[in-house]
Amino acid sequence: MKKLYTLILALSTAVVFAQLPDAFSYQAIAFNSGGVPVANSNVSVRISILNNSVNGTNLYTETHSKTTNSKGLVNLNIGQGTPVSGVFSGINWSVNSKFIKVEMDPAGGSNYTNVGTNQLMSVPYAMVAQKIDVSSPNSSIGDDIIEGKSSNYYFLDKFDRKIYAFNSKTGTWSSKLYNVGYSNNNILPTITASNGNIIFTDKYERTVNVFNSKTGNWSSQLYNIWYYNNGYSSPNVVTLDSGNVMFIDNHDHKVYTFNYISGGWAEKEFNIGYPNNNIAPTVIYSGSNFAFVDKYEHSVKVFNSKTMEWKTQEFSLGYFYNDGGLGNPEITVSNGNFLFTDKYDHKVYVFNSKTGNWVAQEFNVGYFNNNMSTPTTLVSETK
């Protein structure tokens, strides 16, 4: 049996950030079970970037086919392999710690064995500096503030059944085919646009489709076939000014969110009690983040667009049993943050968009004993 052991993890930094590649170098040595380097052999390596912990959300995965040298050394550039999932350029290195998971097939195939997962330290953070430096082509500040907003174009070709999008950053066109059912019925899908993105729902294919101006790619999310059988209806799609997209699939009892930065979809299930009552939870927005109250699960669920994670905070069962049954605490929003007061647990909960976590502060039980009153919460926003 051959094993891969990490030897070096390094990134060559540069003074001129514009010259930095969107990748970082990785070196490792493959040993056999006897501790001897596997020399001059073909190996397959699969690299995954995980968010926040060794068991965190998989942000990006790629594969490499490499040949070891005479000492068993493997050299590769993470970010320049064959993508499997996610978008490397969409990883937000400045939020949360990142972990690298390494897998290998010593036979050069796809029968990967987990070698180990380790935290990335300061290495990729030169990429963060690259995004901040206005001279870098990857700088969001340079794009959005110095160089101004980009302009993407699109049109619908009803005879080819395609929607074409032009990305001014890449200088290329890309297209998305829609179902022939529209042409047969002499109608067209409805297109909306937000912050450079192009969005449409294909009710015959049961997909919500987004052209992402950051990645230059189309991304689709399937919804429940019940909409199709129920007269080709479709879920209501909401787009934010930031370019993020959301829709509720009432029949799959899920909330789907599209993240403008990463170019990926994320989902969160809500209790089946809603579909059984022919209703759906109400989704609220703050900044680029989404949240909803699941009154059956007695929890508040927030999608953080920076980390691409859903975070849940339960509230007291007292709401479930009082206020006429299935009551909810009131949610207030500000700059991507969410706040609610749990009068039964006598706590104030805040979801902090900067850290991506819920935090609680208990208040005196005197409010609880005094007819379950609550302190007044106020907000002071930075300018």
Image (cartoon, helix red, strand yellow):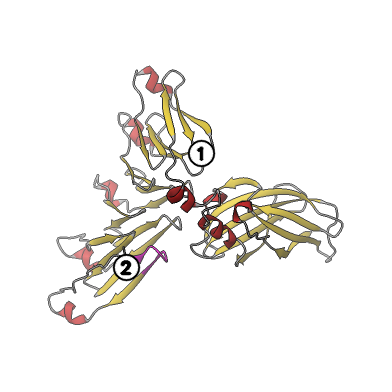
Q: What's drawn in magenta, residue-wise?
A: 350-358
Q: Of helix, strand and loop, which one carries label 2?
A: strand
What residue does disc 2 label?
350
Q: Position of residue 294 (x, y in %)?
A: 29, 57
In three-dimensional space, the C-alpha distance between marks 1 and 2, rounded to whole angstroms, equals 35 Å
The residue positioned farthest toward the left in the image shown: 371
Q: Which residue is mark 1?
A: 217
Q: Quadrant of residue 379?
A: bottom left
Q: Quadrant of residue 345?
A: bottom left
Measuring 70% from the left and 49% from the top, which residue is drawn there? 64
**Label placed on residue 165:** none
Q: Residue at x 34, y 47 (%)?
A: 253
Q: Is residue 145 above or below residue 186?
A: below
Inspect the magenta stretch and tell me whether residue 201 lies in it: no
Type of residue at label 1? Asn
* Magenta-span inclusion, residue 355: yes
Q: Secondary structure at mark 1?
A: strand
